[in-house]
């Protein structure tokens, strides 16, 4: 981390140089009129020491041309390590105890959790209208990290009325994260049928998936297949018919997605990758960091640029 010499947006992750955003952002910056603005990656190991997170936050907060950042993988750890260093924490970040976006406004260093918004926009891109009300399926979120908590909050919004999943299940291989998820989602559990299950191995997750009814949604929110090799399921996984399978990653080996694609025809599955989530995740952060609205025609233009 060196003092920025021009307006800089940071990407805090694990393997940031592999991300498409490194090639896409300069084109987006030009389209948005963000003259001379650049992007830089900050790679940290999974569950890095608290001191490393605080060092990153101290640098970003006090470097004038460091405009803000998108945070992936480290959302919960970074928040827990440095929450006392933020001047403003938005309601989603406070509720989730995670941060996915860092910005500056009116002299304040701000923490935001954008995933309830960006994951919701991505879900609305492929989940049919009134899907839950008409079909009665369940949602299985594999992984108890920030993305799963954000999606649970999305499903638990009052605005959906009775168009909510019959059950939302969060499965995770370690129990401390499940305990933390239960604590953060107490309010959501009053709105939807929410349960947590221990899935220590891919074979255990296979069993959970086998018990789901048709027309369910199964999401890989573990990071396996991108940040680490493997999949939260085995090749023997047996998907319920007419279900939606969402791999929220768009790069990496994506073994989970390929396992689902092998059953796409026989089980009549809709298999979705993480590309639209990638678009909404980044545009929500860029909009916050640079204080510019990105929606409608501008959003469509940026999406087309990213595909080139």
Image (cartoon, helix red, strand yellow):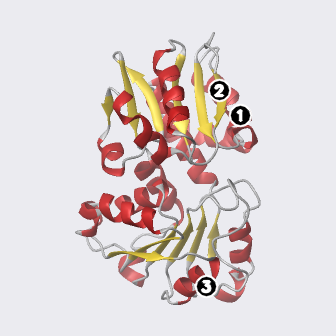
Residue appearing at x 41%, y 59% in the figure:
149
Q: Residues within 10 Å of mark 2 (few under 14, many from 20)?
A: some
Query: Viewer-proximal residue, 32 or 50?
Result: 50
The mark nearer the N terminus, 3 or 1, is 1
Q: Which residue is mark 3?
A: 239
For the point 58% across and 16% down, the residue is 7
Q: Are marks 1 and 2 in contact (CB under 8 Å)?
A: yes
CA–CA distance in space, label 1 to label 2: 7 Å
| Above or below, comparing residue 84 to residue 165 in the picture | above
Residue 219: x and y in percent read 55, 68
The answer for how far apart the CA atoms under marks 2 and 3 are is: 40 Å
Judge whether 189 appears above or below 292 on screen.
below
Q: Are marks 2 and 3 in contact (CB under 8 Å)?
A: no
Q: Secondary structure at mark 1?
A: helix
One can see residue 293 in this view:
no
Q: Toward which corner of the image does residue 35 lie, by quadrant?
A: top right
Mark closer to the chain start, 2 or 3 = 2
Looking at the rendered structure, the secondary structure element under dot 3 is loop
Residue hosting label 1: 22
Q: Which mark is residue 81?
A: none
Q: Is residue 190 above or below residue 15?
A: below
Q: Nearer the viewer, residue 181 or 50?
A: 50
Q: Percent position (x, y) of residue 220?
A: 58, 66
Note whether residue 73 is visible.
yes
Q: Tag on residue 39?
A: 2
């Amino acid at each position: 981390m060196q003092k920025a010499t021009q307006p800089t947006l940071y990407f805090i992750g694990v393997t940031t140089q592999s991300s498409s955003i490194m090639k896409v952002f300069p084109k987006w910056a030009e389209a948005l009129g963000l003259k001379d603005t650049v992007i830089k990656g900050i790679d940290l190991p999974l569950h890095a020491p608290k001191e490393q997170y605080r060092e990153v936050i101290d640098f970003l907060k006090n470097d004038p041309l460091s405009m803000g950042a998108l945070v992936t993988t480290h959302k919960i750890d970074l928040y827990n390590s440095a929450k006392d260093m933020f001047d403003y924490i938005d309601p989603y970040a406070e509720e989730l105890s995670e941060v996915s976006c860092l910005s500056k406004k009116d002299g304040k260093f701000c923490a935001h959790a954008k995933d309830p918004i960006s994951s919701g926009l991505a879900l609305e891109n492929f989940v049919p209208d009134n899907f839950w009300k008409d079909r009665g399926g369940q949602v299985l979120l594999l992984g108890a990290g920030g993305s799963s908590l954000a999606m649970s909050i999305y499903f638990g919004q009052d605005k959906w009325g009775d168009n909510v999943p019959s059950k939302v299940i969060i499965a995770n291989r370690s129990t401390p994260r499940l305990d933390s998820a239960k604590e953060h989602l107490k309010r959501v559990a009053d709105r939807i049928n929410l349960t947590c299950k221990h899935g220590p191995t891919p074979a255990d997750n296979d069993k959970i998936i086998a018990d789901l009814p048709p027309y369910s949604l199964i999401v890989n929110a573990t990071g396996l297949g991108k940040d680490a090799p493997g999949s939260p399921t085995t090749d023997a996984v047996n998907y319920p018919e007419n279900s939606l399978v969402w791999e929220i990653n768009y790069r990496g080996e994506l073994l989970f997605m390929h396992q689902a694609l092998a059953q796409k025809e026989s089980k009549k599955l809709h298999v979705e990758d993480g590309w639209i989530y990638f678009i909404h995740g980044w545009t929500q952060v860029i909009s916050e960091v640079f204080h510019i609205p990105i929606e409608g025609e501008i959003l469509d233009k940026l999406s087309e640029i990213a595909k080139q």
